[in-house]
Amino acid sequence: MKKIFSIILLLLLLSLAACAHTSARQAGRYDGLLYEEVLPNGLKVFALKDPNAPLAVFQIWYNAGSIHEQVGKTGLSHLLEHLMFKGTPKYGPKEFSKIISRAGGVDNAGTSRDYVYYHQKLAPDKLYLSIELEADRMSNLVMDPKETLSERDVVMEERRMRYDDDPQNIVYEEVMATAFKNIPYRWPVIGWMEDLKRITRDDLYKYYKEHYAPNNAMIIVAGNIDVDAVMTKIRSEFGGIPKGGRIENPDIAEPEQSGEKRLYVKKEAELPYVLIGYKTPNFLNDDGYALEVLAGVLSGGKSSRIYKSLIDEKRLALSADASYSSLDKYPSLFFLDAAPLPGKSIDEVEKALYEEVEKIKKEAPDEKEVQKAKNQVEAGFIMGQDSIFFQAEVVAMFEMLGDRKLKDKYFEGIRKVTPQDVQRAAQKYLVEDKKTVGVLVPLKKVESGN
């Protein structure tokens, strides 16, 4: 009797163990052609089958953008992106890209404020290479101290060329840093130079071990692929990587701004430049849609208001623009910017930009202007739908922002915008108390050797 009871107990325990395993792995499911599954270690995987795609795409996204850094350690995310190509014990430095290239593919990576991602394009039957290589470097990256410091020097030089020697980019950095007191958008993705100088190999390794974990990552594969075979390979290569600690996006808000902020940047430059940033919400706030359309009305091509007024009619500006993107995790800025033509002053172009905004505040734009701006926003996405890479990127980007299905909410929100919504958004957000103005004061170039 005792033996029978023991057998029953053993069977019961085995049954419970099997149930536990099943519940840990979220069952896969299809939504049209898109398959979704979460592995037991928390890795989320999407597989998008497109029988007409000539190639396959592999993308892996990590919650490891510059918002996940700290004061004094800015630039870690971008520098780590560089180091991810420095090899593992199995594949040496630069082997990753060579293997992909030999297979006829291409690869690259990018770091943003909100996330970092790595991607490859390959023939569908070569997709296993991406899966093996990315799984390997998710947990086995070698960070040789000498190589790490050498790559840090490369990034510092990149910063000098792309930012420190570009006066308009410096103005942008200063406006962001001045506008935000709290939200991590106040520091640049590439990091401050003084922080880069102090980043150590141990800082990077700690950041890598904390952030490059399956439960902080998401994979999307797309193309004319065998979804079952690809998922089997992903489970095999990534399934054994242990789960890491939980990474949270900073739970942070921005204090209310109580007046205009203004700053000046003195740099060697040919012409002055003005950049105006207004605090605005992201697309999770319904006003974000109207702000997207407002940017299009002001600056959506040569028939838009700013171009016609400042460049065509008044002949004040060499360049003039309005821009806004609601697709950020946190509230950001709506920008106006302009560089005057020689002989015109920075005050004249700044005033002319405000005049165009005031016209919309007083009288809503007509339906035709608004519809054109809405079409431009939507066309930017629709035209990209013929690219399997872009389709995968859109799914992943919205998922990183909260939920891939937010894409539908975004388009629905844009389509509903009315001229009165655009006017109301301008009245509410493009106001002095939400404004930060950066002015480039050009200095004459100092001739060397004389």
Image: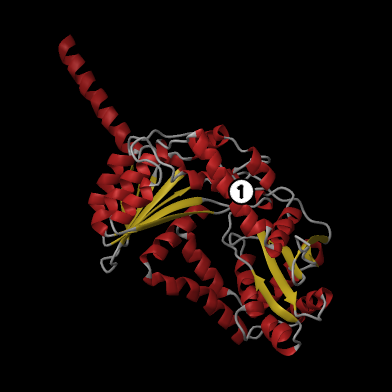
Where's residue 360, x and y in %?
Answer: 73, 79
Residue 355 x, y percent position in the rendering: 79, 79
Residue identified by numbered label 1: 156
Residue 106 occupies quadrant: bottom left
Out of 335 and 160, give the one closest to the viewer.
160
Rendered position, 22 above or below 6: below
Q: Could you tell me which residue is drawn at 23 percent across and 56 percent down?
A: 125
Image quarter (top left, top right, bottom left or bottom right) of the N terminus:
top left
150 and 111: which one is in front? 150
- How many numbered discs? 1
- Judging from the image, the colouring scheme is secondary structure
For this view, does 108 lie left or right of residue 366? left
**Neighbours of disc 1 within 10 Å: few (<14), some (14-19), many (20+):** many
Report the residue at 75% width, 50% height from top: 255
Question: In the image, 433: left or right of 230?
Answer: right
Residue 36 makes an appearance in the image: no
Query: In which quadrant will I find the C terminus?
Result: bottom right
Residue 81 % position (x, y):
50, 47
Residue 397 picture location, percent across and down: 48, 57
Inspect the image, locate mark 1, and give the three-letter code of the amino acid beneath it: Met
78 vs 103, left or right, is right
Would you place residue 58 above or below residue 88 in this image?
A: below
Residue 95 appears in the picture as rendered: yes
